[in-house]
């Protein structure tokens, strides 16, 4: 009896010590302070009043300061300007108007803020809040802010400020429409930018940030005092749950637990196809002018020979690639820009280079390459496509070694030119400075998908394509495209889409055409 | 006994130094510059260098190592690159969720696996024994993410009984627990079966039968009690294993636990979190094993003799035979 007592005491003691160690030492108090912290149980919201959105990787903050933006920020923070998905134009938002200051530089713009706007803590929005936020973003090195000239950005009065750029850049308005949220200066000064972008203490937005349970969800509550009387959010709450494996998110939509699933790159085309005939969920596809390409290392290795690049272009079976990348949804393309791009032109008669392995082999022989071995650098997203290309190239006597790397390693290798060819994508919905990331010689070592084609003509053409004058810019785009096509710097494969899983009956699910962010603040059930 | 515990705790120091060294070395040889993930693509080399200096990545590796070692032993596992929060604080924040899922799963696994193991041993060489062994083997070999997706498809998508992801509802714990429990169950079944088979062949069981005790009484009162030591050991090892291996399950089910925390850090190249997480899990693993050993000494005085005083008991020899096969080799050589 005594021994039994000891035995149970021993087991009980060991168990309780383990539980005490693991559970007891956990934080019962919320992390940090402020609105981003949730209680141990979190806020419970009625399901019918809550839109549940499953996102992929959890953002590090709400403003894209330390991580890519998610589009959720458009729920809780308005921008200086808005962006119209249909017209691709910037529109007034916190700023009711803006005009260029006529000093001949085309780099200074006067913004007039709407009258009577207040943050959700009651503080009025002033021009100084805007200037201060922009300065903080520049100091923090936020993406896109490199062209802001803060020395010449001045506040004229509470409602007016002049924003200066270092040089004119087409599409400069876009960064004010989806990348630089405006917070109150007082809150940023009080807790710092890093905490402000995590806790959003004072914002102007359709929804108010309510709670962030790290690793679990972010909760927003509708702002019933929103300044725009035309906007009416349907759901009282928006809850964003973070599930790294977005395939689980799709299942959650199918089960009715969630309303929308959309990861940083949407959902996979396989999951999208799997939603056909589902009784509860449907797949939506969004054309955001994304295109898939093969880029070549034009600077060194066998691909520095234009004949090799041409041969490799003829050996690319675009229809097969389209099946792999889009399950046949897309269509083969040729150049960097799709046919909906403002400066699109058809440079090749018939549209695209046909799949012609015989011609590819002939071109290689002419170039003096009979047994060629090349290295293809890809992330796991393009592994299947690269493997298919490997098979195509084998038919023409080229051995393609596919190196699948994670993005950071790929970046490092791409920056140093340690590859022969690579698969990449581009999103060129609007005319802006990012259009030439893949080909701009100035971006070598800065863009992981740059083809390292060094050419003065190309640099000059890109410069021309950034001109203020519309006709000159169009001519610049024309020249850039011609140089790319003539030199086979890259080969277009097919266009691409973003896919989302959505509960049946929901409408107004919007995806920003410029960056592919999902805006869920307009979603509502169909009438 | 106290001396033994102190000795075991002191042994943790070189073990942890070894773990820290290995983790640091792996980080040092890993390709890819974490700074690339922390600055914008258009950042200049000066900005990158400034970031490296801020993170201490510009210093020689030896200096980085010594600093890191000192920090870890003073309870500082570093600061997350992404959230700017202390890693240890964040781990403690995520730990309760992981602990609840793992303990629940391991207890569930034991509740199913132990009776199955006993039943299998009692019905040795029958179809029941074979069926249980096959189920156990399938449970052991099926990848946890496959099982997770299968369970979500069945219980969430088809039947709408349980939530597919998240733990905002307590029901959200059920599917992750079942997924882990299936794996755990197979371990219990096999260990219990082999331990029971060994016991029921012993002389005292034959004596008990000769004395006319019922089969239930023999199995439950005598054989199982003696066979339970390795089962307790399995409990400890399963807890340690599942704490460390919860990454996949937490990722699939969107559970905010330590595994998902480390998994996200791997994707983001958040080295302080990866290093700190691995070191913390190694520490917890060691502590769990220590607690299991202490529990053994309380449960069975024979083990106390061997563990505390360094003498090998019969039970320890049995352990050696079962888990290392050393005894079997010796027996084979002798006979």
Image (cartoon, helix red, strand yellow):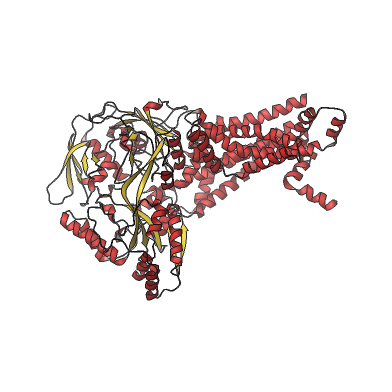
Quarter location, residue A285: top left
User: For this rendering, which residue is in front, B98 or A291?
Assistant: A291
Quarter location, residue B315: top right
On the image, the x and y values in percent for residue B197 come to: 77, 39
On the image, the x and y values in percent for residue B125 come to: 76, 41
Residue B308 visible: no
Q: Is residue B217 left or right of residue A87?
A: right
Quadrant in the picture for the N terminus of chain A: top right
On the image, the x and y values in percent for residue A28 come to: 50, 28
Q: Is residue A419 left or right of residue B335?
A: left
Classify A32 as above or below A87: above
Classify A105 as above or below A186: below
Q: Is residue B206 left or right of residue A115?
A: right
Which residue lies at the image location 75% right of the left edge and 31% below the top edge?
Answer: B225
User: For this rendering, which residue is in front, A503 or A137?
Assistant: A503
Residue B238 visible: yes
Quadrant in the picture for the C terminus of chain A: top left
Q: Is residue A473 left or right of residue A317?
A: left
């Amino acid at each position: 009896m005594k021994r039994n007592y000891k035995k149970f005491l021993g087991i009980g003691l060991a168990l309780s010590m383990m539980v005490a160690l693991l559970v007891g030492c956990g934080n019962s108090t919320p992390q940090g302070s402020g609105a981003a912290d949730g209680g141990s149980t979190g806020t419970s919201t009625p399901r019918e009043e809550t839109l549940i959105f499953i996102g992929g990787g959890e953002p590090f903050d709400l403003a894209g300061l330390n991580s890519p933006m998610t589009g959720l920020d458009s729920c809780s923070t308005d921008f200086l300007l808005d962006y119209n998905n249909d017209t691709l134009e910037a529109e007034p938002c916190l700023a009711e108007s803006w005009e260029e200051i006529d000093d001949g530089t085309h780099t200074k713009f006067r913004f007039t803020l709407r009258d009577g706007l207040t943050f959700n803590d009651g503080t009025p929005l002033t021009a100084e809040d805007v200037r201060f936020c922009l300065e903080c973003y520049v100091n923090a090195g936020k993406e896109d802010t490199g062209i802001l000239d803060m020395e010449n950005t001045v506040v004229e009065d509470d409602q007016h400020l002049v924003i200066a750029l270092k040089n004119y850049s087409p599409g400069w308005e876009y960064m004010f429409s989806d990348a630089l949220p405006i917070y109150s200066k007082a809150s940023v000064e009080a807790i710092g930018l890093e905490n402000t972008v995590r806790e959003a203490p004072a914002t102007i937005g359709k929804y108010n940030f309510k709670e962030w349970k790290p690793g679990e969800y972010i909760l927003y509550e509708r702002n019933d005092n929103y300044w725009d009387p035309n906007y009416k959010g349907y759901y009282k709450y928006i809850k964003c749950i973070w599930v790294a494996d977005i395939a689980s998110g799709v299942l959650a939509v199918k089960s009715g637990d969630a309303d929308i699933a959309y990861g940083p790159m949407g959902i996979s085309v396989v999951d999208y196809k799997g939603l056909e005939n589902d009784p509860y969920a449907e797949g939506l596809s969004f054309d955001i002018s994304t295109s898939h390409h093969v880029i070549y290392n034009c600077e060194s290795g066998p691909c520095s020979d234009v004949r090799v690049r041409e041969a490799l272009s003829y050996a690319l079976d675009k229809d097969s690639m389209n099946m792999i990348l889009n399950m046949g949804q897309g269509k083969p393309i040729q150049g960097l820009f799709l046919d909906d791009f403002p400066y699109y032109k058809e440079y090749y008669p018939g549209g695209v280079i046909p799949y012609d392995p015989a011609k590819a082999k002939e071109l290689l022989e002419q170039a003096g390459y009979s047994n060629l071995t090349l290295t293809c650098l890809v992330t796991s997203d393009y592994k299947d496509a690269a493997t298919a290309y490997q098979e195509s190239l084998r038919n023409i006597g080229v051995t393609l070694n596919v190196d699948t790397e994670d993005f950071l390693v790929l970046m490092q290798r791409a920056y140093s030119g340690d590859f022969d060819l690579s698969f990449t994508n581009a999103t060129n919905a609007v005319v802006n400075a990012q259009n030439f990331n893949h080909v701009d010689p100035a971006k070598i070592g800065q863009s992981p998908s740059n083809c390292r084609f060094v050419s003065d003509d190309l640099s000059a053409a890109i410069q021309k394509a950034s001109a203020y004058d519309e006709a000159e810019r169009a001519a610049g785009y024309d020249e850039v495209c011609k140089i790319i096509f003539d030199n086979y710097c890259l080969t277009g494969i097919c266009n691409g889409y973003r896919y989302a899983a959505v509960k049946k009956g929901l409408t107004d699910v919007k995806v920003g055409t410029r960056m592919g962010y999902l805006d869920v603040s307009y979603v509502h059930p169909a009438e | 006994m106290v001396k033994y515990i102190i000795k075991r705790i002191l042994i943790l120091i070189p073990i942890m130094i070894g773990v820290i060294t290995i983790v640091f070395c792996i980080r040092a040889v890993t390709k890819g510059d974490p700074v690339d993930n922390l600055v914008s693509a258009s950042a200049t080399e000066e900005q990158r260098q400034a970031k490296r200096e801020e993170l201490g990545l510009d210093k020689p590796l030896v200096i980085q190592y010594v600093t890191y070692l000192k920090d870890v032993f003073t309870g500082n596992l570093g600061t997350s690159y992404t959230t700017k929060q202390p890693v240890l604080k964040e781990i403690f924040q995520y730990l309760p969720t992981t602990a609840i899922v793992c303990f629940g799963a391991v207890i569930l696994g034991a509740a199913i696996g132990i009776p199955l193991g006993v039943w299998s041993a009692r019905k040795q060489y029958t179809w029941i024994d074979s069926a249980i062994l096959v189920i156990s083997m399938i449970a052991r070999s099926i990848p946890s993410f496959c099982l997770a997706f299968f369970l979500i498809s069945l219980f969430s998508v088809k039947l709408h009984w349980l939530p597919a992801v998240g733990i905002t509802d307590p029901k959200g714990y059920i599917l992750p627990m079942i997924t882990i429990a299936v794996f755990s169950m197979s371990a219990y079944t096999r260990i219990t079966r082999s331990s029971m088979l060994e016991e029921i062949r012993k002389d005292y069981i034959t004596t008990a039968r000769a004395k006319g005790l019922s089969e239930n009484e023999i199995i439950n009162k005598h054989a199982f009690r003696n066979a339970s030591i390795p089962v307790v050991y399995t409990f400890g090892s399963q807890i340690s294993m599942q704490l460390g291996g919860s990454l996949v399950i937490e990722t699939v089910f969107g559970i905010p636990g330590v595994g998902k925390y480390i998994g996200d850090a791997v994707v983001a190249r958040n080295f302080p979190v990866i290093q700190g997480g691995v070191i913390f899990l190694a520490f917890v693993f060691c502590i769990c094993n220590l607690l299991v050993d202490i529990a053994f000494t309380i449960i069975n005085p024979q083990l106390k003799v061997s563990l505390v005083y360094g003498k090998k008991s019969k039970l320890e020899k049995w352990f050696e035979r079962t888990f290392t096969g050393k005894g079997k080799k010796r027996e084979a050589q002798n006979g």
